[in-house]
Structure formats: structure tokens, C-alpha cells
Image (cartoon, helix red, strand yellow):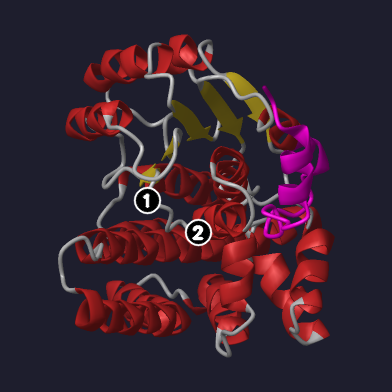
Amino acid sequence: MTDTGNATDLQSLNPFADVIGQPEAVARLTKASENPVHAYMLLGRRGTGTYRGALGFAGLLLGNAAEEGSARERAVRLAVEAKHPDLTIFEPEGAALRVSEADAIIKAGLRTPVEGNRKVIVVSGVDAIEEAAIGKLLKVVEEPPPSTVFVLLADEVPPEIVTIASRCVPVDFGPVSQSELEAALFAGGAEPKRAKMAAAAAAGDLDRARLLATDDALADRAELWRSVPDVLDGTGFKVCTLVDQLRDGMDAAQGPLEARQATQLEELEERVEQLGERGSGRTELVARHKREVRRLRTDELRFGLGLLAGVYRDRLVAGPDSSAESALRAIQTTAENLIRNPNEPLMLQALLLQLSE
């Protein structure tokens, strides 16, 4: 029997507090948590709140499955923090979800829950999956144990994963507006000017916006990217100099993230000291930190390329300019190739050499 009263109580804990601008998606997930099916697919580009939405949904699912009282509150809190023992999160280590990762997902799906009668498996990047892994993931998603709920995250549904998507209940996450991000940052204590700048640079990603709101060098990095067309002089030396400067700025942008990661490692070390190394999650944390750094640098590149493209678009507004049109095509190609995890300095050098022509 569905305990709808319990679901209402858990909603008051606000497991979707970090999901902004998605009232319809939150309402659908909240309703679905009362009588869940075996699989859901949250659709939306990174930054729209799909990951935080998945954690909030997991909180409701695991909270509903927990005992009365404080155990339910604990289940929600741990799930939202991605720390619940019956919540497993998979993120591709590389550019695509590999066969070995699909095998790990299958094993996790077949395990018995640790605390209650339900477990939740969140899988990011399902739309970027190796062909050989599709059949494996499809099999476990369409026939999971009764105790397992899959929550798959994808930017979109390309043809190769249509069969997987057809086994899931779709939940759409639309774009988050800059004004909504700005309001969230301001409500979190950021100064208005800083909130506005961080929201503009975050491309709809609340986590990135929060990080940028603590970044004192954001304005300097933005100005450096905008200055590139005027500084290029057709020489390889200038290209190499600019690439070094751009990468130095990206290195500095890692500062707030590295500070947060250092705090997380310190907290882990304290737990290890008290409880021992076994089951500490050290390997998973280190792997997550590496993914976060890689994602941050990709976000910084997208941010910079967007600013660079803006300069050339402004030139086109002023009048016909074939060199600006060529530059925009080169920038667009570079942005599209980011999904392949290219060599960072070589990619930037190639782009700036094209822009120098």
C-alpha cells in the first residue's frame, strides 16, 4: 500500500532544494516517488538540474522505504548528499559509458539493498555510451530486481539509446534562465554584482554558478578571452603565449574547487581515523574529484569559446566580415570537439592559429 502521508512528510524536507527552475519535473518526480516503477530517464543538458533532481528523487524513494521517524529523514538527507548506502551513482570515467562500466552497473543492480527493501542506481551520461554496452544496460534496465529503481540521466535521446529510453519513464528538465540562477545565488548570500557575473558564466549550471560566485578572478579570465582577437598578430609565438595565459587562468579557476575537494578529503581522513579504511569510499572520492576537475576545465573552455564567439558575432553585426564568419566556424568546431576530451594545449593552439590567418 502506498503511504502518501509519508511522501507528503518527506516533501517538507525539501529534497529538491538545489533544483531551480524545474517545477514540472519536481512535481512529476514527487508524484512518482509514491508508487515508483523500475526505471526513469531524466532528460536535460548538464546544468538543468538532472543530477540534483536524481538525488532528490532517490531521497524520496529511499525515505519512503525506510522505517518511521528519524530513519526516513536520515535516508533523505544521505541520499541528497549522495552518501546513502542504497544509492549507487555511476558516471563515465571517459567520454563514453564503457562495457566495463555497464558490467559494474549490472552487478550493482543485482545486489540486495543494505538498509531497507529498495535501492536506487543513478547513471549519468547514458546518451554517450559505447555500442557494445547498450545491450547490457538495456537488459538490466528492462528486467531489474523488484528492489531496484534505475534513474538514468541524458542530455537527449539519440537513436542508439531509443530502446533503453522506451523502458523508462521520461522526465524533462528545461533550460534554467540566467535570472533564476542569479536569484538563487543572491539568496545564498552572493553579492548582486558577483551573482550576476557568475550566473552569466555558468550556462544554467547551479553548481558551477556557486563555484564561480567565489572566484575572484572570473572577470579577469573573461577579459582575457575577449582580448584574444585583438592580441593575435599572426605569429606562432603570440599563439603559444596566449595559450599559456589562457591555461594559467584555467589553472587558477580550479582554486575554489580544489579548496572544496581538500575539505572533503580532510573529512574522509577523519572518518578513516575513527572507523578504518574499509568501505571509506576513498577510491570513489578521488575518482569523482578527477571528474570534477576535468568537467571544470571543459566548462571553462566552453565559457571562453562562448566569449570569443561573441566578439566575432559583434563584428558581423557591424557589417559583412568573411574572416569573422570563418572564425565562428572554427570556434564552433572546437566547441563540438570538446566531447572527445582533446589535448587541451594542442586544441587551443590549433584554434588560435586558425584565428590568426
* Residue 65 falls in image quadrant: top right
Element class at badge 2: helix
> Residue 278 appears at what percent x and percent y?
15, 64
Residue at (55%, 48%) from the top-left corner?
55
* Residue 182 falls in image quadrant: bottom right
Q: Quadrant of the C terminus?
A: bottom left
> Residue 323 appears at what percent x and percent y?
56, 53
Q: Is residue 356 left or right of residue 206?
A: left
Above/below status of 3 relative to 23? above
Magenta stretch encompasses residue 193? no
Q: Is residue 282 left or right of residue 313?
A: left
> Residue 352 appears at what percent x and percent y?
40, 63
Above/below status of 112 relative to 348? above
Q: Which residue is mark 1?
A: 85
Can residue 115 be seen at all in this image of the molecule? yes
Q: Give the magenta-colored segment's residue range.
A: 1-27
Can residue 249 be seen at all in this image of the molecule? no
Q: Is residue 259 left or right of residue 109?
A: right
Q: Which residue is mark 2?
A: 78
Q: Mark 1 or mark 2, which has the lower sequence index?
A: 2
Magenta stretch encompasses residue 15? yes
Say whether marks 1 and 2 touch (CB < 8 Å).
yes
Residue at (56%, 46%) from the top-left corner?
67
Q: Nearer the viewer, residue 300 or 226?
A: 300
Q: Amino acid at mark 2?
A: Leu
Q: Tag 1: Cα neighbours inside 10 Å, few (<14), some, or many (≥20)?
A: some
* Residue 5 falls in image quadrant: top right
Q: Quadrant of the N terminus?
A: top right
Give the CA separation, mark 1 to mark 2.
Answer: 8 Å
How many marks on residues? 2
> Residue 314 appears at what percent x and percent y?
73, 60
Q: Amino acid at mark 1?
A: Pro
